[in-house]
């Protein structure tokens, strides 16, 4: 044998840091211990236990996506694989696609449609702005698309398309299928697939759902499913073919070996969302994100996007003048063991508010790490004022569970 065993066989525990880093960036996000435990199990991918897990993943997903009859399909792959699954199945070479482009991820949906040789029109939305329904309607009239693609939250530059329900309604009126990327938003803020007439909703594991990366979900409406079943061309993507995936997700048979551990992790993450309930979960995200926003502004930094277009699940913070963002991130990580994200273009750093990131102790630690690091780097910030704003905002929010616990402790 010519190639030998490498001499530096290093065990994993000597590579991983002794104290894990707190992941407060734009994903992946921390996962609950029960999700991690589920991810450590391997079972038969076609056995009875798996069938039961799959049934429950579908029924819990219908709650999380808010769809009564939507077809739920899982995909072994990143959020991008789920995006490609939605696009590949709903866009054919003779489709006209209107892609609302706010940034990196919404542009990726347009790229995917172009690769399918569809005719793609991009509606480029101004930086830091949400897409406007009037403009979308003009494009719908002019280009008569069969499919519209849009992100609910554009993670790359922290813009939220808060007119999504209105835009989806208009698209529906123009007989156009609507694909929504909700990777960073699903279960962090309202998205009502049936009520809003959305035809495909995409999510990944490692963001809003607070699960592991690499296992994703897509939900197709009945209208979308009719289109898929009515196609008589053969899809170019075998793995992403929804009709083949249906075999595993609805007929207990083989498509490809499902990522069993990942599906168990997803089951656990969905179960935790269902037991928290969407209502309480949205409130928790709202409260924590608002408190962090006030903390950031309270210590003297500026947020990149104004309300109401500001995404709450990922916050963009303007990098103070003279600060090298890469050096800041490295310092925060080494000195404070807190990871946040840089950006793809805009001069911002980003802090996530998805799933387990929305816990008071994580907010204090992230805000302190950011403020203290910037002070060390010579930016003059009022960190105590920021921490005080964080605390008072957390207090202000009506949040019955916390108050109930506080009362129980007092009495
Ligand atoms: C992260 C993200 C994606 C891509 O997910 P990957 O798992 O990195 O492929 C797509 N869309 C949005 C909005 C995202 O935030």
Image (cartoon, grey):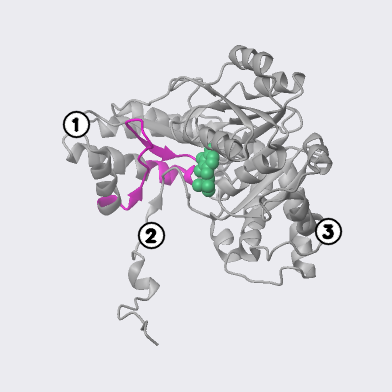
Q: Quadrant of residue 239?
A: bottom right
Q: Residue at x 72, y 33 (%)?
A: 193
Q: Residue at x 61, y 11 (%)?
A: 134
Q: Quadrant of residue 151?
A: top right
**x, y percent for residue 380:** 19, 30
Q: Is residue 105 above or below residue 330?
A: above
Looking at the image, is mark 1 or mark 2 nearer the viewer? 1
264 and 284: which is toward the camera: 264
What range of the chain is rendered magenta? 335-364
Q: Which mark is residue 403?
A: none
Task: Say which residue label 1 marks.
Answer: 322
Locate the C terminus and report the quarter of the image it occupies: top right
Reading the chain from its start, which is encountered first: label 1 or label 3?
3
Task: Say which residue label 3 marks.
Answer: 251
Q: Quadrant of residue 127?
A: top left
Secondary element at tag 2: loop
Bin the neighbour count of mark 2 within 10 Å (Cα to Cα): few under 14, some 14-19, many 20 and up.
few
For the residues labelled 1 and 2, the Cα–Cα distance comes to 30 Å
| Beta carbon at label 1 within 8 Å of ligand 1 | no
């Amino acid at each position: 044998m010519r190639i030998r065993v490498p001499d530096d066989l290093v065990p994993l525990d000597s590579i991983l840091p002794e104290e894990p880093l707190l992941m407060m960036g734009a994903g992946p996000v921390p996962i609950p211990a029960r999700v991690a435990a589920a991810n450590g199990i391997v079972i038969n991918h076609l056995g009875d236990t798996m069938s039961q897990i799959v049934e429950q993943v579908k029924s819990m997903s219908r709650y999380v996506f808010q769809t009564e009859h939507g077809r739920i399909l899982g995909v072994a792959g990143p959020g991008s694989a789920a995006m490609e699954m939605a696009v590949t199945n709903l866009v054919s070479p003779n489709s006209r696609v209107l892609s609302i482009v706010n940034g990196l991820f919404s542009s990726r949906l347009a790229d995917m449609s172009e690769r399918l040789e569809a005719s793609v029109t991009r509606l480029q939305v101004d930086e830091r702005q949400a897409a406007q329904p009037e403009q979308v309607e003009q494009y719908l009239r002019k280009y008569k698309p069969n499919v519209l693609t849009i992100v609910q939250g554009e993670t790359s530059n922290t813009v939220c398309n808060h007119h999504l329900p209105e835009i989806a309604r208009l698209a529906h009126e123009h007989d156009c299928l609507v694909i929504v990327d909700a990777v960073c938003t699903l279960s962090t803020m309202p998205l009502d697939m049936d009520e809003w007439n959305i035809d495909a909703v995409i999510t990944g594991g490692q963001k809003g759902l607070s699960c592991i990366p690499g296992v994703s979900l897509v939900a197709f409406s009945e209208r979308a499913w009719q289109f898929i079943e009515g196609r008589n061309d053969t899809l170019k993507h075998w793995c992403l073919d929804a009709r083949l995936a249906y075999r595993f997700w609805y007929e207990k048979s083989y498509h490809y070996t499902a990522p069993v551990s990942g599906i168990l992790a997803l089951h656990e993450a969905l179960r935790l969302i269902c037991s928290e309930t969407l209502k309480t979960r949205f409130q928790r995200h709202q409260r924590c994100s608002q408190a962090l926003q006030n903390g950031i502004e309270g210590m003297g930094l500026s947020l990149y996007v104004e309300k109401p277009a500001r995404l709450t699940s990922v916050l963009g913070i303007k990098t103070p003048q003279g600060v090298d963002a890469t050096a800041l991130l490295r310092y925060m990580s080494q000195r404070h063991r807190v990871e946040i994200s840089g950006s793809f273009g805009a001069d911002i750093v980003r802090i996530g508010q998805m799933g387990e990131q929305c816990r008071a102790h994580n907010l204090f630690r992230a805000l302190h790490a950011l403020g203290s690091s910037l002070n060390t780097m010579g930016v003059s910030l009022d960190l105590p004022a920021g921490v005080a704003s964080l605390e008072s905002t957390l207090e202000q929010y009506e949040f019955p569970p916390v108050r109930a616990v506080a009362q129980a402790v007092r009495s």
